Amino acid sequence: MKRGLLPVMVLLATGSVFALGIRESNARGEGNFSVLVYITGVVAGSPPYELLVEGAQAFAASRPNVTIKVYEAGFNQAEWEEQLTSLVAGGEYDLVLGSNPSLPDICANVGRKFPSQKFIITDAEFRDNPQISTYLFNQYEQSLCLGYLAGLITTSSMPHVNSAKKIGFIAAQEYPILNRHIVPGFLDGARLADPSIELDFRVIGNWFDANKAAELAGGMIDAGVDIFASIAGGAAQGLIRTASGRGAYIVWYNTNEYKLAPGIIVGCGFMGQKKLTEEILADAVAGKIGYGVSRTVGVKDGYLDFIDDDPDYIASLPQDIRDKFGAFMNDIRAGRIAYTVPSLY
Ligand code: RBF
């Protein structure tokens, strides 16, 4: 404490010229902490981005010296690196915060041009770069949970269930976390309920085309799918439309969306991205972030879970399914289910 105070007292005693010099060398301002929240897409309709922004804004609201700028980079992925480069070129931001598996590579390129710029990215895994810190959600685990529930549903006698043991997954685009963690986890989970379950997997090609998602979902229902999951951002609205119109079920990743289609969206996962964001920013302001490293978070430590206390969940599924699934979730929460997370590479 004493050691920390001494330079401040010297600075005050030596007067304004010295103090001004210090201020000029720090364009961001003494004591202020400025964060660029870089959204790789648009916020609306994408749970990871909505939660990231909510967390950053909640943190800034509690700290008057923290300022947040949210930038939506849009859907043209080819432009993301150039956009980020021009945003950080002025040296305005103490930190760039983002949430996307493709961001660390982009940040590494941008960071080479601006060696003092720091980046923290969630939903990604990247190591050994002293400017970049990453946090990976164990989405294999959330997928195992949602997949097991989908397996219980497709083998049940619920009103919209047919005799085919077929579950569906609609993805906006393919990428390593999707192909190696999310989709395999979903199928592995379903096969814990019944090993003969098959997966119908289809790709939209972008994160916004709800009509294409609706059309794909229709074809999948024709092919025997009665329960869906999707990772599709705003395009998932098309799946909800078709499932509601034709009669099929959906399990939803990351956020509580039961209200969007009660009785159709029958299970929702939880992603603790808001809490993680607030913790990350507190650590960043305190200078406690480890750069060059990646940390994985999941159900056991409370960063992923399943929302089973919502009245719409309880009303949507028969007691026997909720009992079986509840026992499974308790085992996952307690670390009693053994599984191996596949390699991302
Ligand atoms: N998830 C979204 O919810 N909305 C998006 O717009 C979005 N864009 C993505 C773009 C790229 C290039 C990649 C690799 C992933 C994207 N994701 C998006 C997926 C996101 O990172 C995460 O894996 C899923 O949302 C599941 O939590």
Image: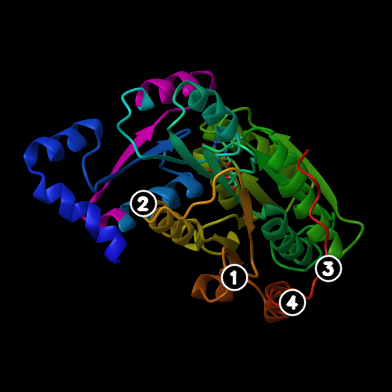
Q: Amino acid at mark 1?
A: Ser
Quadrant observed for ligand 1 in the rendered image:
top right
Camera-nearest label, 1 or 4: 4
Q: Residues within 10 Å of mark 2 (few under 14, many from 20)?
A: many
- Bounds of the magenta span? 60-87
Q: Position of residue 196 (x, y in %)?
A: 92, 57
Sequence order check, earlier mark of 2 and 4: 2
Residue ID at (29%, 59%): 4
Q: Is tag 4's residue or tag 3's residue first in the polypeptide sequence?
A: 4
Q: Quadrant of the N terminus?
A: bottom left
Q: Which residue carries the number 1 mark? A: 316
Residue located farthest toward the left when viewing the structure as drawn: 16
Amino acid type, residue under disc 3 in the picture? Ala
Q: Quadrant of residue 118?
A: top left
Vertical placement of residue 331 versus 228, above or below: below
Name the residue: 78% across, 68% down: 156
Which residue is tagged 3? Answer: 338
- Element carrying mark 1: helix
Residue 117 seen: yes
Q: Earlier in the sequence, mark 1 or mark 4?
A: 1
